[in-house]
Image (cartoon, rainbow, N blue to C red):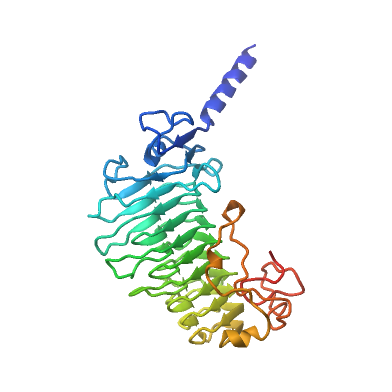
């Protein structure tokens, strides 16, 4: 009997310790309520103040306006502040929209404009999932770098289906000691820092990241940002960028690179690859499609398409044995500029008409790139610079670099023929 009683209490303790709570937020809710489905909170911040490992916050459809009355400990210039709240490796904390197709919007236009405004801030908080929400309206009044979403000293954060747009600063930024961060199937666009004349509003940025960190950007679209598309400024960690589309970046004083690899601040280890760029597209950017920007690190840049940029590649200051394979360059104003240490096997065409002689391309209009995402916020299937089977210079002519392909050999460029 004693064993049965002990087992009963052990089960009760296990359930109570591992209980997971779901909190709800609605534009019609009240922070005086309890946060259930029938009595939701009114603000994201109230729900955040309640969570612990394994809990979920569901944000219902609508537009939310954090402002001077938001009690987040960083009044009044942070829209939402996640500070020192950790999940665990087996029990992440999740903040998400109620379902796919429903877009709750965090509109930060009411934040106090006298300081460094930031929309959603994740600070010293690990094991978070942020899914299917929009962040917009962060304003700038001095030259400090504002951001739609920013993570500082946070690890194992997963952004999925997040959109950050129309902010006067960086769309999405992570900095300092952060590892295991994945930005997946997110969009960052129309971000412009007016006070700095466009000089700091990158689409996605991992900056001042320590050596030993390893982070990921995949399936993202980045366009119409005033500075760079993806910027890895003073990032000494490993970055993997896969299946991302960056276009029309660079306004006024902004640099306008599609992919900026650095700069770095360490002496790199020679056998480690610090930068991977794979299956990506860069088009119509003001400056380079891809630049090392003094990142003296080994890079593997494979199966990408760079179209109508000022230059395709500027990678000449790098002393490491980097690899460029199966890349396709079309109608960039300046040709690729490689350093002597780079091993390369790329195709370059000086004009679209020259390339089109080999096959028909269905579209070169970026409207197609902005079409609706698919299930789980996946990239849409597009015909933008996608080859037909008749393009015998591109299809099945690449080198096997370990990426997925479906015929006898890989194709050149970001779009594998027959893969839909």
State left or right for residue 15 relative to residue 72: right
- Nearest the viewer among 311 and 315 is 311
Residue at left offset 52%, top offset 78%: 320
Residue 121 % position (x, y): 38, 50
Residue at left offset 51%, top offset 60%: 214
Residue 149 % position (x, y): 40, 54
Q: Quadrant of residue 18?
A: top right
Does the image show residue 271? yes
Residue 49 % position (x, y): 38, 37
Q: Quadrant of residue 281?
A: bottom right
Q: Is residue 16 above or below residue 43?
A: above
Q: Quadrant of residue 9?
A: top right
Image quarter of the C terminus: bottom right
Image quarter of the N terminus: top right
Residue 250 % position (x, y): 40, 73
Q: Is residue 192 above or below residue 162?
A: below
State left or right for residue 4 relative to residue 186: right
State left or right for residue 306 relative to residue 46: right
């Amino acid at each position: 009997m004693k064993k049965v009683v002990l087992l009963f209490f052990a089960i009760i303790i296990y359930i109570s310790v591992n209980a997971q709570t779901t909190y709800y937020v609605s534009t019609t809710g009240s922070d005086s309520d309890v946060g259930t489905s029938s009595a939701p909170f009114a603000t994201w911040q109230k729900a955040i103040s309640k969570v612990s490992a394994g809990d979920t916050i569901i944000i219902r459809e609508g537009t939310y306006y954090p402002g001077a009355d938001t009690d987040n400990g960083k009044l009044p210039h942070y829209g939402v502040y996640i500070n020192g709240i950790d999940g665990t490796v087996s029990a992440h904390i999740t903040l998400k929209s109620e379902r796919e197709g429903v877009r709750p919007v965090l509109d930060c236009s009411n934040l106090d404009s006298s300081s460094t405004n930031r929309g959603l801030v994740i600070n010293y908080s690990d094991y978070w999932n942020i899914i299917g929400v929009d962040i917009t309206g962060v304003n700038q009044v001095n030259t400090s770098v504002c951001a739609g979403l920013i993570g500082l000293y946070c690890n194992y954060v997963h952004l999925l289906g997040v959109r950050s747009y129309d902010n006067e600063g960086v769309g999405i930024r992570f900095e300092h000691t952060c590892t295991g961060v994945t930005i997946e199937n997110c969009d960052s666009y129309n971000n412009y820092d007016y006070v700095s004349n466009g000089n700091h509003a990158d689409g996605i940025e991992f900056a001042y990241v320590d050596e030993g960190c390893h982070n990921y950007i995949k399936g993202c679209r980045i366009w119409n940002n005033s500075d760079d598309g993806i910027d890895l400024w003073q990032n000494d960690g490993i970055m993997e960028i896969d299946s991302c589309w960056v276009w029309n970046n660079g306004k006024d004083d902004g640099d306008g690179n599609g992919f900026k690899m650095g700069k770095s601040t360490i002496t790199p280890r020679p056998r480690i690859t610090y930068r991977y760029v794979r299956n990506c597209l860069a088009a119509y950017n003001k400056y380079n499609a891809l630049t090392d920007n003094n990142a003296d690190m080994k890079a593997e840049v494979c199966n990408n398409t760079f179209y109508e940029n000022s230059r395709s590649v500027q990678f000449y200051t790098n002393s490491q044995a980097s690899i460029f394979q199966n890349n396709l360059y079309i109608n960039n104003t300046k040709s690729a500029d490689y350093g002597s240490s780079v091993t390369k096997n790329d195709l370059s065409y000086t004009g679209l008409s020259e390339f089109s002689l080999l096959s028909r391309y269905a579209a070169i209009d970026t409207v197609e790139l902005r079409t609706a995402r698919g299930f789980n916020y996946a990239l849409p299937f597009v015909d933008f610079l996608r080859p037909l089977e008749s393009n015998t210079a591109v299809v099945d002519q690449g080198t096997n670099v370990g990426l997925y392909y479906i015929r006898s050999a890989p194709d050149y460029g970001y779009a594998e023929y027959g893969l839909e």
